[in-house]
Image: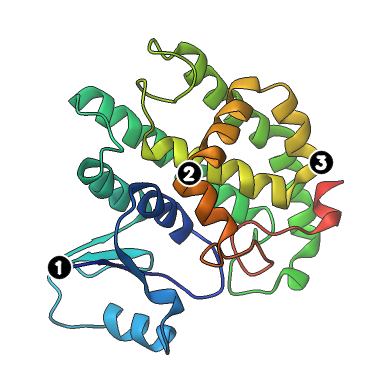
Amino acid sequence: MPYELYYWPGIQGRGEFVRLVLEEAGASYIDMAREPNVEATLTAFLERADLAHPSFAPPFLKDGQVIVGQTAAILLYLGDRHHLAPSDAADRLWVHQIQLTIADLVGEAHDAHHPLGGDLYYEEQKPEASRRAKWFRKERIQKYLDWFETILARNPDGDAHLVGDTLSYADLSLFQIVEGLLYAFPNTTKAVLAASPRVSALRVMVAQRPRIRAYLKSDRRVKFNEQGIFRHYPELDD
């Protein structure tokens, strides 16, 4: 049976990290965001009273009778099944730790344009967003990408991957993070990447993988837009 991926329609969001893994794995899956009445389907699923382990919010993955929520947990589950996670227990935990740190960065990237909360429009918090985005650009993007650069440099199996000598779901997620930052904060991110050769090389490597390259060119890849996590407001990238 194909996997079922549940996420909001029209945006990449956190669901995109899962899509990249499913695409790289060549897994059969149904992207429920492209199905009719998806928002009603999502709401009904989240409100089901018969689920012993209900998800708090999308994304979540349904694999037969197994339902997994939270992006990092979904990737841990898929990584084990599709050879996108190390077999060594310590390395598996290390990949998971990297993924959780990526989740922190995703949250900070969102809060750069919505520092007061998602229930307000961007226009209702522009002064606060300007201040928060300035801090994110000046301090946080550099700090995070420096950390990834260090991990790549210290990988005893070579600096082409974050962990070990083969692709893991963390590599795919780092690719997505860089793509999102380049969309939202192109001026800042290009400058930081110029001093991050290993991160830049990993981005190119992932984009050139046959299944990922085909996915990026397809209509299955939702374009970045101003409804998702990574949003480009030129005034926030001065």
Looking at the picture, tell me which residue is in the foreground, 73 or 1: 1
User: Which residue is at a point 86% across and 55% down the rendered structure image?
Assistant: 235
- Spatial CA span between label 2 and label 3: 29 Å
- Sequence-wise, which precedes: disc 2 or disc 3? 3
User: Which residue is at a point 69% across and 74% down the rendered structure image?
Assistant: 121
Query: Which is closer to the viewer, label 3 or label 1?
Result: 1
User: Which residue is at a point 26% across and 38% down the rendered structure image?
Assistant: 83
Looking at the picture, tell me which residue is in the foreground, 28 or 63: 28
Residue at the spot of label 2: 210
Which element type, helix, strand or loop, lies under badge 2?
helix
Label 1: few (<14), some or many (≥20) within 10 Å?
A: few
Q: Is residue 176 above or below residue 111?
A: above
Residue at the spot of label 1: 64
| Mark 1 touches mark 2? (CB < 8 Å) | no
- Spatial CA span between label 1 and label 2: 28 Å
Label 2: few (<14), some or many (≥20) within 10 Å?
A: few
